[in-house]
Image (tube, rainbow, N blue to C red):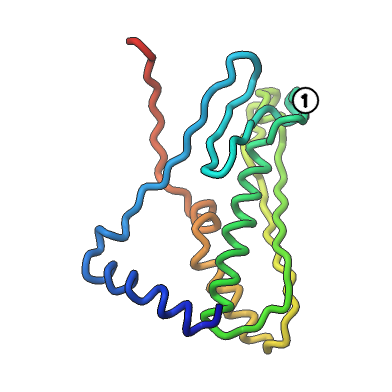
Amino acid sequence: MDSESLRKMQAPLKEQYRAAPDAAIITLKARGELDSASIACKVETGRALAVAGLHPATGGSGLELCSGDMLLEALVACAGVTLKAVATALDIELRSGTVSAEGDLDFRGTLGVEKTAPVGFRDIRLTFDVDSDAPQEKIDTLLKLTERYCVVLQTLSKPAAITTTVSRNGA
């Protein structure tokens, strides 16, 4: 896809959202079912069923997906798609590239071993490695705009308000 095709594809959506801002508010959903036989949660991904379980550092077998890994994978996927879209819009040729994310966790927090240890990622590093002849200033703009428009990156950087509830079946 080239920049003109991308613009043509997105133009009616942008116009619709300018004219009716509420049309741009879409609720994405995820659902999982608790496994009755093990410490796992079966998550419907829309394409397949993913079974998430405990990380081996917390006693898991390593056979199920780790939620922390899945979070980093979502970041990599979103950042990669955003980078490609921005590169396309700016007519920056990327011959190839990789996106990687790594994050540091202190499992003492997760296991309640040390009350001052954080629960969750302490640091996350997102790295892009691209093969392009574009001048550095264009690559810098590419990174800046990718950071700005990547939904997962922005959500992690500026956390959304989250509400939690619990309901009881049959109650």
In the rendered view, tell whether residue 39 sits above or below residue 73: above
Where is residue 102 drawn, in percent x and y?
A: 72, 51
**Image-based side of 57 in relation to 37, left or right:** right
Residue for badge 1? 61
Quarter placement of the N terminus: bottom right
The quadrant in which residue 8 appears is: bottom left
- The structure residue drawn at horizontal position 70% and vertical position 31%, both measured from the top left corner, is 64
- The structure residue drawn at horizontal position 58% and vertical position 29%, both measured from the top left corner, is 42
Q: Give whichever of 142, 63 is nearer the camera.
A: 63
Where is residue 136 drawn, in percent x and y?
A: 68, 85
In the rendered view, tell whether residue 54 sits above or below residue 71: above
**Image-based side of 105 in relation to 9, left or right:** right
- The structure residue drawn at horizontal position 72% and vertical position 58%, both measured from the top left corner, is 100
Task: Tell me the amino acid under the disc marked 1.
Answer: Ser
Quarter placement of the C terminus: top left
Where is residue 111 drawn, in percent x and y?
A: 68, 24
